[in-house]
Amino acid sequence: MQLLVDINCDMGESFGRYKIGHDKEMMEHISSANIACGFHAGDPSIMKETVRLALKNNVAVGAHPGLPDLIGFGRRNFSLTPQEAYDYVLYQTGALHAFVQAEGGRIRHVKPHGALYNMAAVNKELAKGIAEAVYNLNPDIILFGLAGSELINAGNETGLQTCSEVFADRTYQPDGTLTPRSQPDCMLTNDDDAVNQVIKMVKQGKVTTHAGDISIKAETICIHGDGEHALSFAEKINSAFEKEGIQRINYG
């Protein structure tokens, strides 16, 4: 049986004169682009340019809404209500939708960013607020969330199609959550380690934690665009997929 998997990357995270990531180079190695919407990163011009780049490369466009925290890159936890989560996601996704529509494309998915993503993974009410925002904008949009998380559950309960996400460059806790970035072992920085983790998740449905293997559902693989090794990860993961008979889905 042919194994199919999506590869996504967080993009459009530059801001003004500050450049983050390797968006242009990464496009040929992915099938989905999660485009920052201005709260944690990005600005109107960057959003427009990244949408155009994705459409030109036949890469599916997704919104990547985060907390209003440019200084902290959206990775600091804020206290917020489910209604605020709803408003933040609807506002940002709506802004990206305008650029996508103007370029003749469509938003295929939404993936929350950073702290918003991680909080929604374990907070049922926040997850519900996010899912309802996506559904009310367009019930055909796919919601990306951490595999096995409350965000995936909320999306399914709301009536959205969901896509369970796993990470090439992050380590996992025994409960299926990501190791916090405050811990020294949160990231995989060795290319081979990242590739091996991805292959195991896709082919065996398992990931290794400090307490042993746990089951995981891998429908889309995230490569962080701002990561130091993002481009080499992407190249080697695609090469490994070809050797292992895993096909990258093309949603564009």
Image: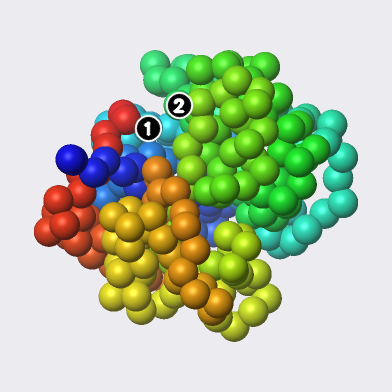
As rendered, which of 35 and 78 lies closer to the eye?
78
The quadrant of the rendering that contains the N terminus is top left
Q: Is residue 132 left or right of residue 223?
A: right
Q: Which mark is residue 108?
A: 2
As rendered, which of 63 and 174 lies closer to the eye?
174
Q: Is residue 212 visible?
A: yes
Location of residue 131 with respect to 165 vertically, above or below: above
Location of residue 123 with respect to 82 vertically, above or below: below
Q: Are marks 1 and 2 in contact (CB under 8 Å)?
A: yes
Q: Is residue 227 visible?
A: no
Q: Going 57% across and 48% down the picture, which residue do you hit?
A: 148
Residue at the outermost bottom position: 184
- Residue 61 image point, x, y percent: 43, 32
- Residue 221 image point, x, y percent: 40, 51
For label 1, the SS is strand
Q: Residues within 10 Å of mark 1 (few under 14, many from 20)?
A: many
- Residue 80 image point, x, y percent: 86, 45
Q: Amino acid at mark 1?
A: Ala
Q: Going 46% across and 69% down the picture, which residue do you hit?
A: 213
Residue 181's image quarter?
A: bottom right
Residue receiving disc 1: 60
For label 2, the SS is strand
Q: Is residue 115 left or right of residue 97?
A: right
Q: Amino acid at mark 2?
A: Arg
